Image (cartoon, grey):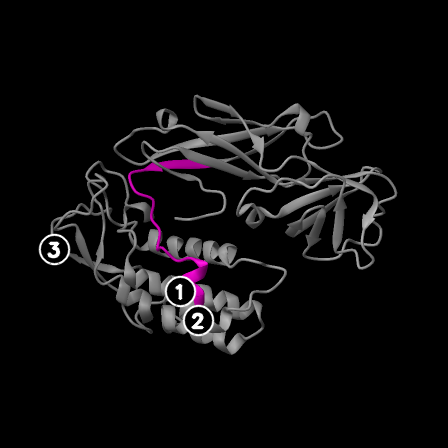
Amino acid sequence: MSTLYPRTFRVGSTSSFGWAATEPVQADLGVALTIGGFAAAMAQGVADVGIAAGGVNTDRTVLTASIAPVIPDNFLRFGDAFLITAEGYSVPVRVLRVDGTAILLSNPLPLDAALTGPSTLQFAAWFATIGPANVTAAVDYQGAEWSIAYTPHATLNLAYAQGLVKVVRVIWQTGLDTALLIRTFPQFQNVDHRNPSYQPIIDAAAQELAMRIDTDVASFVTTSGERATIDDVQSQNSALLQVHLYLTAARVSYNRSDFLASEGHITKAFGTESNVDLRRKTGLYADAMRPIWIDLDRDGVVDDGEVETITGPGPGFTSGGFSSTPRVTVARQR
């Protein structure tokens, strides 16, 4: 599944571990990543940017850098940043575009953020590269805890962020990107200037869809005894791609206050919803899940016979979950 900060790694591949800081960090003291026995120093996606005293325009939406920052291609999808003033005041901002020394913000700076002295713009994104030798070459799903140690700005106390990663044979994804979204829905060609890419919305919709699928395949057990997860489901499924398209379109329409269109896209994707069964069982999603292929032996290939005919009851039918009539004998959780 495609996300801005991926937490799923593919066996035997080089992976980039990204982290979005929730507060300014003392970069000179380092940011340390550990995952099990693996350890690495994380690097800033863009070095701290110096902002000259008074370096903001009259409507407070453009900062002036002392030296033009070097911005990698496609980096501004990670546009979250912090403006640290000479007085130690920190303001969260989002950078839309960098043109030489001019840095365009999505929203005006608050009036109490005085730039009477030199300030610093620090992007929130940090990265570490994990080589294939360090990505667990396990046959099955592996879970490991990651931890990041850092020192917040203007303190000497360590702070921590943590979560889980998993290693799989194939990372589930639909293949949806901004270009396909616009080709399917030409009315979305004009992107909101405050959000120069649809990728964050596409990623959020993918996560929502993945959680639904993950729930609906949880009753299946792999040959090693683990419960099936989203990453065991056949990737690049054209039917689930359609669901992802309409779910994304619903989010875009909602953000544009076109609530009627948003509701229509949701209905197209998931159909109607019953009062007694809160999970949607009709629409494109139900069609896409009948049948669905699951890599039960987790060899990275969906083999002939690994198909489950999952049928969802319609509105008004009380059910604890999807029923399943497999073509092959499959162990089921009780």
The x, y position of residue 261, in whole percent, is 48, 76
Residue type at mark 3 is Arg
Q: In terms of image quadrants, where is residue 190?
A: bottom right
Of marks 2 and 1, the one in the foreground:
2
In this picture, which residue range is highlighted in magenta? 164-182
Mark toward the start of the polypeptide (2 vs 1):
2
Residue linked to disc 2 = 185
Q: The residue tagged with tag 2: helix, strand or loop?
A: loop
Question: Is residue 318 in sight in this rendering?
Answer: no
Of marks 3 and 1, the one in the foreground:
1
Question: Is residue 253 in sight in this rendering?
Answer: yes
Q: Magenta stretch containing residue 168, yes or no?
A: yes
**Residue at 50% over, 69% down:** 188
Residue linked to disc 1 = 245
Real-space Cα separation, disc 2 to disc 1, in angstroms? 9 Å
The x, y position of residue 83, in whole percent, is 74, 43
**Residue at 33% over, 71% down:** 283
Residue type at mark 2 is Phe
Mark toward the start of the polypeptide (3 vs 2):
2
Q: The residue tagged with tag 1: helix, strand or loop?
A: helix
Residue type at mark 1 is Leu
Marks 2 and 1: CB-CB under 8 Å? yes
209 and 120: which one is in front? 120
Mark toward the start of the polypeptide (3 vs 1):
1
